[in-house]
Image: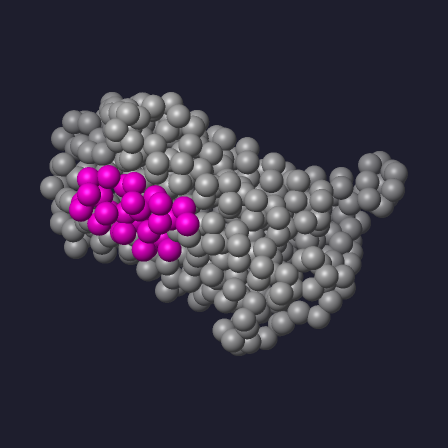
Amino acid sequence: MSITKQGVPIFAGTADDAEASVYRKVSWRLLPFLGVLWVLAWLDRVNIGFAKLQMLDSLQFSEAVYGLGAGIFFIGYFLFEVPSNMLLQKIGAKKTIMRITICWGVICMLQTHVTTPAQFYTLRFLLGAFEAGFYPGVILYLTYWYPSERRARAFGTFMSASAIAGVLGGPLAGWIMTSMGGVHGMHGWQWLFIIEGIPSVLAGIFAWFYMTDKPEHAHWLSDAEKRVVSDALKRDNAAMGERGHDWRSVFTNPKVWLLIAIYFCLLCANSTLTFWIPTIIKDVGFTTPMAVGWIAAVAYLCGAIGMIANGAHSDRRNEVRWHFSGAALAGGAAMAVLAVLLGMNVLSPVVAMLAMTASLVGTMSAIPVFWQLPNRYLAGSAAAVGVALINSVSNLAGFGAPYAMGLIKNATGKVTTGLYLVAVIEIVAAVLVVIGIRQLGNKREA
C-alpha cells in the first residue's frame, strides 16, 4: 500500500489484495485483545477445576458439591446472555465488554472467601451471570467486521484463546497453588482466585479506551480502508440473500432450535473435558498440581492448533458441515477410547493422555466452525438474539454434564460411565449437522 501526498491510500495489486491487506490490519487490531479477554474469562471460569485439587479437602466438600458448583455457573449464563446481547446491540460492544470483564474479575476474587456450599453455589452463579454475554457478544461483534468467507478463521483465532488459557492456566495454577500456600495464612487455592481475578478488572478498564464499536468508528482505519470493509460486508449480505431480521421470530425458528441441539451436544463434551481434565489426569496417576498443570497445558496447546487450523481450512474450502462433523466425530470417538482405557485394570498413562488430548482437539476444533452456521439464517436483531439464545440454552450442558459427572464419580469412584455417555452425545452432534443442516439449509450448505 502506498500513500499519496493528500494522504489518501492507494492500494497496489488487485482488489482482493487490498481487502486482504485491510483485514490483516483489522485482525491485528481486534483479535489479540479479544483473545486476551477470552483467556482471562476462561481462566476465571475454569480455575475451579484446579482449585478443586485442594479446595475440597480444605472445605470438606464432596465431588457432587463440586460438580453442582462448577455447573451452576451456566444457569446464570443461561439467564443473562440474551439480555446482554440485546444491550450490546443498543449501547455498543465497548461498554458491554467493559462491564462484563470488570464484574467477572471481582466475583472471581470473592470466591476466596467461600466456606459453605451455599456460598460456593451463589458465587459460581454470579460468575456465570456476569460473564454471560461476553462470548456471544464477541461472536456478534465480529460479524460487524468480517464477511462470512473470513469469519471462521477469525472465530477460530479468537476461540483458540480458550485453549491458550488451558496452556497457561495449568502451569500457572500449579505454581500458585504450590508456592503461595500459607502466604498471609491463606491456602494456595485462595491465592489462585485472587491472582487470576485482578487482571480481568484491569483489562475491563482498558477495554473502554481501546475497543471500537463498528468499522465506521475506527479512527485507526483510513476512509479508503473503511470503504473496503463496508464493501466486503455489503457484498456478503447480498450473497447471503434474505434472512430473518425480526428477533421475535428466533424463538419459533426450527433452524435455531436445531442449532441449539447441535451445540448443546458439543458442549456436553467440551464442558466435561473443561471441568474434569485435572481429575482425569490425577486419576491416571499424575498427582501433583504442577504435573497436572503441565499435562493439561500440552493438551490445550494441541486444542488451540486444531481450532485455528480447522477454522482456516473451512474458510479456504468454503465448507462448514463436514469440518464440524468430522471434528466432533473424532472428539467423541477419542473420548470413548479414553473411557475404555480408564476402565481397564492395566492402564497406560501415556496412551490415556493421548486419547484425552485427541478428544480435546476434536471437540475444540468443531467450535469455531459451528459459529458459521447461525449467520446463514439470521441477521440484524435476529442475529443478536439468536446467537445469544443458541449459546445460552446450549450452555445448560455446562451445568448438566459436570454435575452428572460428579454424581457418577461419587457413586462409582470413576468417571468412565460418564465419559461413555458424553462420547455418544458428541457423536450425535456430528450426525445432526450432516443430516439436519442439509435438510434445513440451502445450496450453500450442500
Quadrant holding the N terminus: top right
Q: Residue at x 34, y 32 (%)?
A: 341
Q: Looking at the rendering, which quadrant does residue 198 occupy? A: top left
Quadrant holding the C terminus: bottom right
Residue 279 in view of the camera: yes
Q: Looking at the rendering, which quadrant does residue 165 occupy? A: top left
Q: Residue at x 62, y 52 (%)?
A: 321
Q: Is residue 413 magenta?
A: yes
Image x and y of residue 313, in percent: 66, 40
Q: Is residue 401 magenta?
A: yes
Q: Is residue 22 left or right of residue 310?
A: right
Residue 175 in view of the camera: no
Q: Which is more toward the observer, 101 or 421? A: 421
Q: Is residue 11 left or right of residue 413?
A: right
Q: Looking at the rendering, which quadrant does residue 154 occupy? A: top right
Q: Residue at x 76, y 41 (%)?
A: 20
Vertical side of 430 occupied by 18: above or below: above
Q: Residue at x 88, y 38 (%)?
A: 13
Q: Which is more toward the observer, 56 or 415? A: 415
Image x and y of residue 384, in percent: 55, 64
Q: Which residues are magenta?
A: 397-424
